[in-house]
Image (tube, helix red, strand yellow):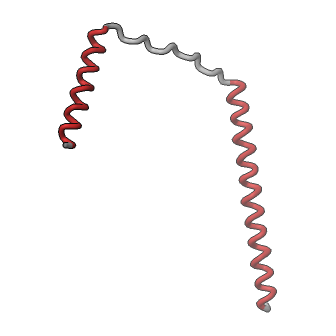
């Protein structure tokens, strides 16, 4: 084989490889979209859950606020 024939066969093999990869990726995307459509159609979505009720008690809020303030004060004292 001459070098030009060998080069042409290499280019041909490269184009076949790229074509097969492209075809596989297109097929993969189509399968994923089909599965997404089918699951959306046949599987019902779970009902949205209600937001958790806020905790009652101003006393707890005051304790949390005091703890946050103490942590900030301690952090600033360490930094100098």
Name the spot of residue 3 as percent of width and height, x first. 77, 90
In this view, the residue farthest toward the front is: 80
- Given residues 7 and 65, the one toward you in this image is 65
Q: Is residue 37 above or below residue 6?
A: above
In this view, the residue farthest toward the bottom is: 2
Q: Is residue 59 above or below residue 38?
A: above
Name the spot of residue 50 as percent of width and height, x first. 51, 13
Say which residue appears at 72% left-offset and 60% top-offset. Answer: 21
Say which residue appears at 30% left-offset and 9% top-offset. Answer: 58
Q: On the image, which quarter does residue 42 sit in?
A: top right
49 left or right, relative to 24? left
Image label count = 0
- Given residues 60 and 79, the one toward you in this image is 79
Q: Is residue 3 above or below residue 62?
A: below
Say which residue appears at 76% left-offset and 73% top-offset. Answer: 13
**Quarter that holds the C terminus:** top left
Say which residue appears at 58% left-offset and 16% top-offset. Answer: 47
In this view, the residue farthest toward the top is: 57
**Quarter that holds the N terminus:** bottom right
Name the spot of residue 77 as percent of width and height, x first. 18, 37
Q: On the image, which quarter does residue 15 sit in?
A: bottom right
């Amino acid at each position: 084989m001459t070098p030009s024939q060998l080069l042409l066969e290499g280019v041909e093999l490269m184009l076949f490889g790229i074509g097969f990869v492209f075809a596989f990726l297109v097929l993969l995307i189509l399968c994923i979209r089909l599965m997404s459509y089918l699951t959306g159609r046949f599987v019902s979505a779970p009902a949205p859950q209600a937001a958790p009720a806020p905790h009652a008690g101003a006393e707890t809020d005051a304790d949390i606020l005091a703890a946050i303030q103490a942590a900030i004060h301690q952090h600033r004292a360490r930094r100098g």
